[in-house]
Amino acid sequence: MSSADTDSTTPPPIRRGAMTLRATTPEDCPFVVEVERHPDNAPHVEQWSEAEHRAALSRPGVRHWLIEHRDTPIGYVVLEDTDDPNGSILLRRIAIISKGRGHGRTAVLLAAHDCFDVLGCHRLWLNVARNNRRAFNLYRRLGFVEEGIARESVRKGDRFISMHVLSMLDREYRATHQL
């Protein structure tokens, strides 16, 4: 039995159809890094080492989810500030290896369900690189509202890139997406 099976603070899996979010285990971290480094994801996703992902698994205020489709791992989600006193949770990262099949959409909705219905947050927010139109358009279709641009806020190699800041409030989620 893994530590996730015995830890009483491990959240239960969240399911919708063939998609499941389950707590990432240390044994999952090599796969998580592989997803992050995938050529479709690497230009858009911050790169953490396996050790950084392992550390995040036990960091207070973090939920690190593995995304599975029909019990096969296809990606991961990291939520931060789940203990924020203002009820504002950051969707720090989501990465999927199977693009164009609706898995990202479903995974974002499951993460939103965790934030709004399970944790009771008021606001779910995220940053998305200005050149990541696919992700930006997905978030907008799901009802995230653009709050502005964080200018040159993320270093990528020897340059800085600007990020869209988007959010969804609890009432916006409940109006359209409750599971």
Image (spheres, rainbow, N blue to C red):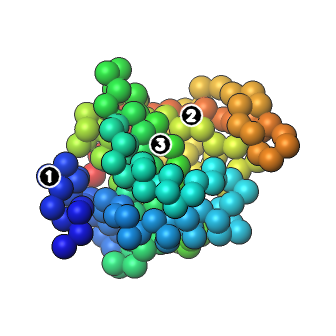
In-image side of 71 versus 10 (left or right): right
| Mark 2 surroundings within 10 Å by alpha-carbon count, few (fewer than 14), some (14 through 19), many (20 or more) | many
Number of numbered labels in the structure image: 3
Instruction: Give how far across and how far down residue 9 sits, in percent.
Output: 19, 48
Please, is residue 112 above or below residue 90 in the view? below
- Residue holding disc 1: 8
Q: Residue at x 65, y 26 (%)?
A: 148
Residue 52 appears in the figure: yes
Q: Nearer the viewer, residue 119 or 177?
A: 119
Q: Earlier in the sequence, mark 2 or mark 1?
A: 1
Residue type at tag 3: Leu
Q: Earlier in the sequence, mark 1 or mark 3?
A: 1
Q: Nearer the viewer, residue 84 or 98?
A: 84
In-image side of 86 versus 99 (left or right): left
Residue 141 appears in the figure: no
- Residue holding disc 3: 91
Instruction: Give how far across and how far down residue 79 sits, in percent.
Output: 42, 44
- Residue holding disc 2: 166
Give the SS element for disc 3.
strand
Name the quadrant of the N terminus: bottom left
